[in-house]
Amino acid sequence: MTNLMKSLLRWELFLIVAIVLELLIFSMITPGFFNIQNLLFSMNDFAYIGLAAIPMTFVIITGGIDVSVGSIMGLASISVGVLWMNGVNIWLALLIALVVCIIAGLINGLIVAFTDVQPLVVTLGTMFLFAGIALVISGGGSATGYEGISGFPDPFVEVANGMILDIPNVIWILFGVLIVFGTLLHFTKYGRSVYLVGINSKAAKYSGLSTKWIVMSTYMLAGLGGGISGVILTSYFSSARADLGSTAILPVITAVVLGGTSILGGKGTVLGTLLASVFVGIMNYSLQLSGMPSEQTTIVVGIILILAVLLRQSKWTYMKKRVSREKNQVPKISE
Amino acid sequence: MKILLKLLQMRELSIILLMILFFLFVGSINSEFTSADSIILLLSGSIILLVLAVGQSFVLLTSNIDVSVGSIMGISAAVGGTLLVDGSSLMIVIISVIGVGALCGLINGIGVAQLKIPAIIMTLGMLGILRGLMLIYTEGMWIEDIPSYYKMYAVTDFLGLPYPIWVGIVICLGAFLFLNQTKFGRYFYAVGDNLDGAKLVGLPVKTVGILAFVFSGMSASVAALIFIMNIGFVPNQTGSGIELQVIAAAVLGGVSLTGGVGTVLGAALGAIFFTVINNSLVYMKIPAYWNSAIAGLLLLVIVISDTKFQSYFTKRNQAKLSNQHIESQGLEDSSP
């Protein structure tokens, strides 16, 4: 167990070192890059990935996956917009939108937990379903399918654009989400059972855990994460759109996997996911600052994703070999 | 009753049945939907998804997944577009475009089968890499001025059907015969059904795994060739976001993500059904923004009811088997 903790710690340390190196290299290449204020504000552009990726970590740890999170973002955004346009108080609208997203997560969770359909297939279906519902709501609300709703009140726009103590609000929110979800995953009984379901679902069941409820709840958390992310994006752009998160799903999964969560389940930390989103975010920002068009930065991110998994994998096989060698030696010593 | 159950168990038949019901339903609302012209239009509209779904089936059968097909389609379309604009001969265009797809698939395959990177990670990475490379290659510009002789293939009939439909039929039948009638084709099922078992009996597991990705890449480049034909230019976002539709279509057609289950015919039918759902709303006078909601709902309902049905069927079979077992044991006991 301590070995496992050590190797996990090492990966997060590796990510921190990578972020520091990244900052050093880019400040050497691009003069005037190392400006704390600018860097903090660049976080605004990618914090939404982290906000959705942190709860997604739970789902992937149980061995599942949720590709509907991007659609849930759009659903949250358009719910806030349409409710507000119909005269609902903006904060109440925000709360209702989050509840809607938790219900969306509940639908995912119910189907995944109570049928034999694979999580990828289920959430693929709900991805189309939720995106469609968001479009229908926006079509019914303003009669124009893709057009956004804008003109939100200032206090709502301030949520993602304001600052407290010279630090952008978004960073505070990201920090808050990290602490809440980090505590939930790493310091509660519930968190331990999430890991157990991912490592060995049968063992979890026979030790009296309600595995179905645990699996279902992780999808609800992922839905909530998508909701928070969608609301923050709406506030940030001051515009509600049904297709807001349509391209978010791949970066979100990249962040979770780069953060050290195994796609096969049972392994991963919330901190790793956050660090990976920061790493990818700074990489995008810096590459753009040094003149690379934003669409082309996907090359670098893709290469890093593949290399990181290769790196982790080779270490893992090495460790596995060592363990099996030790096992083989035990009988000899006893003889 | 027994025959009906057997038939329902064959996914291809149940999807055809569903599709006929759906056609009759929409046709009863608007008879234009069932006219030969609109059916041919629907079929040609579904060919891109169909070809991609057939390619994806190879990967899904070996219990992997390929989410990079959208980007492979994009970069192949870019290469094909520039070659066509430069006036290269059709043969050169086709060979080099399919070469690009095969190469991308080969890289995916080596990553997954040789380096043991989980397929979803490898192809997710490639999705980003290839999209970026395409934008570097095109310098962010759209490729226009595709020669009109090439665009004409999309609407020219051959034996009563437009060329793209023939391409779809040939690929679909070719893949089906390869997978079901050749020894090597059966390996794909074996590898996906039981990897360790396939290894033990000495099948070339790695080659099969790599080839599956190569086929998927090649299908993406064929889709790109048809895309250029249909659209007449190559936008930057060619193929982006199609990967999830492709997987949904294959799953709709009964190809399992756990490997070893399903046929390319099923996947092709799934792709056609997916297109039919998306195009039927116009005929029912429902606003187009209902498309994804209805497609998603139908996908979920079909997949869930299929799983429920299959598990009911296996349980029944098991019960029958164990009954037989008990009976035969009883006979043995009483015989001496």
Image (cartoon, grey):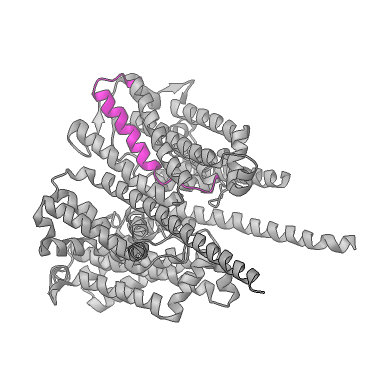
- Tell which of B16 and A132 is nearer to you: B16
- What is the quadrant of residue B153 in the picture? bottom left
Tell me, yes or no, whether the highlighted magenta stretch contains residue A76. Answer: yes
- Tell which of A270 and B13 is nearer to you: B13
Query: As drawn, is A298 to the left or to the right of A145?
Result: right
Quarter of the image that includes the N terminus of chain A: top right
Up/down of B247 relative to B158, above or below: above
Q: Residue furthest right?
A: A335
Q: Residue at x 48, y 35 (%)?
A: A221
Quarter of the image that includes the C terminus of chain A: bottom right
- What is the quadrant of residue A272 in the picture? top right
- Tell which of A211 and A172 is nearer to you: A211
Up/down of A106 relative to A66, above or below: above
Q: Residue at x 35, y 60 (%)?
A: B250
Q: Position of residue B142 (x, y in %)?
A: 24, 57
Tell me, yes or no, whether the highlighted magenta stretch contains residue B38. Answer: no
- What is the quadrant of residue B51 in the picture? bottom left
Asked whether residue B2 appears in the rendered view, the answer is yes
Q: Residue at x 55, y 63 (%)?
A: B116
Q: Position of residue B156 (x, y in %)?
A: 12, 72
Q: Position of residue A248 (x, y in %)?
A: 39, 44
Asked whether residue A266 appears in the rendered view, the answer is no
Number of residue marks:
0
* Magenta stretch bounds: A62-91
Q: Residue furthest bottom?
A: B182
Q: Residue at x 64, y 47 (%)?
A: A203
Query: As drawn, is B282 to the left or to the right of B131?
Result: left
Q: Position of residue A28 (x, y in %)?
A: 51, 44
